[in-house]
Structure formats: C-alpha cells, structure tokens
Amino acid sequence: MIIELIFLFAIILVGGFVQGVSGFGLGLVVMGFLPLLFTVKESALLVMVLLLTASLTVLVKTWRHLEIKALIAIGAAALIGRVAAFFVLTNYGDLDVMRLWLGIFLITMVAWMFLNGRRRTKPDAVPGPFTTAALGTTGGFIGGVFAVGGPFFVFYFLMRYKDKFKYNAGMQAIVVVTCLFSLTLHGAGGDFDAAFTYYVAAGIIATLIGTRLGFRLFEKLRNDRIRTIAMVLVFFAGINLVVFG
C-alpha cells in the first residue's frame, strides 16, 4: 500500500502542477496511470474529488474574473452529459474493458489536441448554441465517465476569451459545478468506499501542492510547453492501458 500511495502521490503532484499552470490537465495525467491500480470507476471518482480540490484552489484566486452568464448555457449542457455518464459509470465502470476504452480515448484526445492546438481561433467570440451544446454535453459525459472532459471546455473558453484569467476562472468554475454534481449523484448511489480514505487524503495533499506550484508559475511559463509535456505523458499512458490494461 505504501508503494501505491507513493506512486499515486507522484502522479497527482504532476497532474496538479499542470492544472495550476494551464487550467486543466490533472484528470488527463492522473487517469492515464491510476487505472493501473484501480478500476476505471474507482479512478474516476477519486479524480473527481481531486479535480474539485484543484479547481476550488485556483478559483479562489481567480473568481474576480468570473463571468457567471457565460457559464449558464455550457453548464446546463455539461450537467445533461453528467446524468448520462452517471448511469454508464455505475453500470460498467468496474469492467476491465473500460481500461481499453479509456486508453483509446486518451490517445485520440491527445491527437485531437495537438491538431487543434495548431489552429487559430477568434477570441472573445460567443460560440453558437450548437457548438455550446455539443462541447458541453460531450465534455460533461466524458468527464463523468473518464474524468477527462476538460479539453472540450478548454476549447470552448479559448474561443470565448482572449484574457487568460477569464479563461482560467471559467474553466475552474465549470469543473467545480460538474464535479460536485457527479459526486453528489454517486454519493447518493452508494458508490464510495471507506477504504479509499487514505488515497483521497494523499491525493488531496498532492493536488494542493502541485496546483499551488503550477499557479505560481502561471504568468511565467509558456502554457503550450507545459501542455506538450503533459500530452506526451498522457499518450504513453494511453498506449500502456491499451497494451497492458
């Protein structure tokens, strides 16, 4: 158990750092490795707790830049996706085949992010209703099943804001809302295991340290370099899940 805790602490520390620097990444980094120790369902629930912790930590520092009206449409769509995800994760989250699907999704997501990272988008433009609904529902569903729905919201807020502080505040707020919603559903469904207390405690500590370190460097480091390193880690983690998961 000690080795597992050390491994978990190290992975979450890296994920928390990426989250603090770029506004997302904790779920992608951690979910690439955590299912090697636990089921996808257990991993996703743990990561949701950590995402909630990380996002609250950053949101406390960026809430003045938050625009509530910008969250209504994307938030509503995301919650619809989370309801569907709840039933999928509850019924199929303990199956070994979910590791395979997670690995395939991570590899696909990394490829999608690298391709879209080279495209220029117009900032400060409100996305249309279809784009908002599609990104919100998909991000909510993927986030509720695999805890890696962040990139869909990154794409949305990057389209909407040129100001990186508004972007970051919006990202953290949507994560807080969706994670609270999912954790409430799973808590009511009795999906939490008391034995996970140690892992949650270690994970929260690592998340707080990593997020604070990352946020301190938020203004100094280039986000694209941090994201590139994180995505390389996620890609190889996805390969590992597909081949050995």
Image (cartoon, helix red, strand yellow):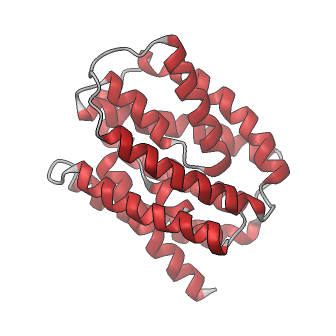
Vertical relation: 176 (above or below) 12: above
Residue 190 visible in the shown view: no
Q: Give the quadrant of residue 182.
A: top right
In the figure, is residue 127 to the left or right of 84? left
Indicate the position of residue 197 as horizontal and vertical percent values: 66, 68
Which quadrant is the C terminus positioned in? bottom right
Q: Is residue 176 left or right of residue 79?
A: left
Q: Position of residue 60 (x, y in %)?
A: 36, 41
Quarter of the image for residue 38 reads bottom right
In the drawing, does residue 11 fall left or right of residue 80? left
Observer-nearest of 1 and 37: 37
Q: Quadrant of the N terminus?
A: bottom right
Residue 222 at x, y = what percent?
A: 19, 51
Q: Residue at x 54, y 54 (%)?
A: 106
Q: Residue at x 61, y 55 (%)?
A: 104
Q: Measuring 65% from the left and 62% from the top, which residue is drawn there?
A: 43
**6 in relation to 63, above or below:** below
Residue 34 image offset from top left, x and y in percent: 59, 68
